[in-house]
Amino acid sequence: MLLEDVGARKESLLNLQRLAVERARTIDDSITQFNDVLASHNLGSGFRLRHAMERLRDRYNMDFKSESLRTISMDNPFLSQLRQVAMNDVLRDIKHSAPR
């Protein structure tokens, strides 16, 4: 409402919200996408989660899905649930800060 009061169009705000939701839904695509979402919403920093994921990706050539012969697929139920919880947190934040 504050942005609408200064002249921002509601359609523009809804478009930004839609883009944020689309970006959050890419969390399962790769470690890089997962880390981008974690960083932009400041999630997992207390556990150095981004650092651990970057290390698995960079040092050990691991990712959620193996897209080349050099990349090792490392997805498991724990990591899948971790991503789901992160995505739910992001979507909840978007919902509660949405324009009405």
Image (tube, rainbow, N blue to C red):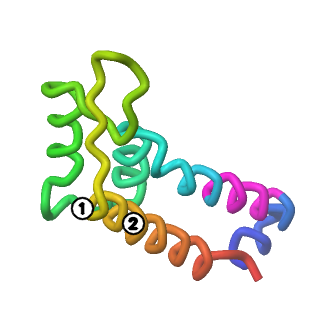
Secondary element at image label 2: helix
Please provide the residue range marked out in magenta: 12-20
Q: Earlier in the sequence, mark 1 or mark 2?
A: 1
Front residue (pair 45, 3): 45
Query: Where does the image place residue 70, in percent across and percent down from the top left?
Result: 28, 17
Secondary element at image label 1: loop
Front residue (pair 95, 63): 63
**Quadrant position of the C terminus in the picture:** bottom right
Distance from Cα at disc 1 to Cα at disc 2? 9 Å
Query: Where does the image place residue 69, in percent across and percent down from the top left?
Result: 33, 16
Q: Residue at x 51, y 75 (%)?
A: 93
Q: Which residue is mark 2?
A: 86
Going by the numbered disc 1, the residue's amino acid type is: Gly
Marks 1 and 2 close (CB-CB < 8 Å): yes
Where 48 sits versus 10, above or below? above
Front residue (pair 27, 11): 27
Front residue (pair 94, 56): 56
Going by the numbered disc 2, the residue's amino acid type is: Ala
Dominant SS type (magenta) = helix
Q: Which residue is mark 1?
A: 44
Q: Residue at x 58, y 71 (%)?
A: 94
Residue 7 shown left or right of residue 88 in the figure: right
